Image (cartoon, rainbow, N blue to C red):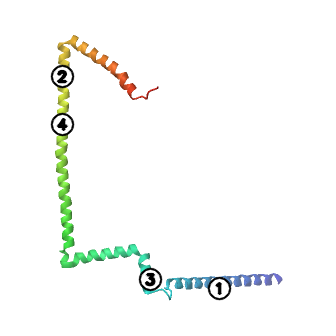
């Protein structure tokens, strides 16, 4: 019998604990709700202008997007969509398209001129090589002497050119 009484006491104390926990949770929730209601209400001494300014400051981006959308909608619907804003946008689009076409045209012209210049340089180099080969084939001794003189001149000038870029050791 003592065992049965102990079990009843345990059940009773568990039920009391649960009720107590529920009451504490309910109190905390109501206190939190009251706090959030108090913080959402503007204070009595704050002016409506200050409250509005704070609202605008806190929601600047969404308000800007809304204002932009309303402005564009108004601009589009004035005079059935045929207004200065839409006409200006069309003219701007046409101007950009025209400028892009001109840039493409001038780019092709400049590219063609550059290609022609490179071709002329290549042709000149081929003529120079052909002329040098013809001279070497017709005058081998003179070509050898000229090559030796060129090599001697480079051998004489190269050390001076290399030493000119190094600091003096004096």
Q: Residue at x 61, y 84 (%)?
A: 26
Q: Secondary structure at mark 2?
A: helix
Query: Residue most toward the front?
Result: 170
User: Would you call the spot at circle 2 few (<14 residues within 10 Å), some (14-19), or many (20 or more)?
Assistant: few
Residue 70 as seen in the image, left or right of residue 39: left
User: Would you call the spot at circle 1 few (<14 residues within 10 Å), some (14-19), or many (20 or more)?
Assistant: few
Query: Which sits earlier in the primary sequence, circle 1 or circle 3?
Result: 1
Number of numbered discs overlaid on the protein picture: 4
List the residue tagged with mark 3: 50
Query: Which sits earlier in the primary sequence, circle 3 or circle 2?
Result: 3
List the residue tagged with mark 2: 130
Mark 3 to mark 2 CA distance (whole Å): 90 Å
Q: Are marks 4 and 2 in contact (CB under 8 Å)?
A: no
Q: Secondary structure at mark 3?
A: helix
List the residue tagged with mark 4: 117
Q: Quadrant of residue 136?
A: top left
Give 148 or 130, whichever is nearer the viewer: 148
List the residue tagged with mark 1: 23
Give the x, y percent position of residue 37: 52, 85
Give 164 or 46, whichever is nearer the viewer: 164
Q: Is residue 86 above or below residue 132?
A: below
Q: Secondary structure at mark 4?
A: helix
Q: Quadrant of residue 159?
A: top left
Q: Residue at x 19, y 73 (%)?
A: 84
Query: Which sits earlier in the primary sequence, circle 2 or circle 1?
Result: 1
Give the x, y percent position of residue 101: 18, 54
């Amino acid at each position: 019998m003592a065992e049965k009484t102990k079990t009843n006491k345990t059940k009773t104390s568990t039920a009391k604990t649960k009720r107590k926990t529920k009451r504490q949770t309910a109190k905390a929730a109501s206190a939190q709700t009251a706090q959030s209601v108090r913080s959402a209400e503007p204070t009595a001494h704050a002016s409506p202008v200050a409250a509005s300014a704070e609202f605008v400051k806190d929601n600047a981006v969404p308000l800007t997007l809304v204002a932009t959308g309303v402005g564009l909608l108004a601009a589009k619907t004035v005079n059935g969509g045929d207004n200065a804003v839409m006409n200006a946008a069309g003219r701007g689009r046409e101007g950009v398209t025209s400028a892009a076409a001109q840039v493409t045209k001038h780019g092709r012209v400049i590219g063609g001129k550059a290609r022609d210049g490179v071709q002329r340089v290549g042709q000149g180099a081929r003529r120079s090589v052909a002329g040098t080969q013809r001279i070497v084939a017709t005058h081998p001794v003179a070509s050898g002497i000229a090559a030796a003189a060129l090599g001697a001149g480079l051998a004489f000038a190269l050390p001076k050119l290399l030493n000119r870029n190094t600091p003096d050791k004096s």
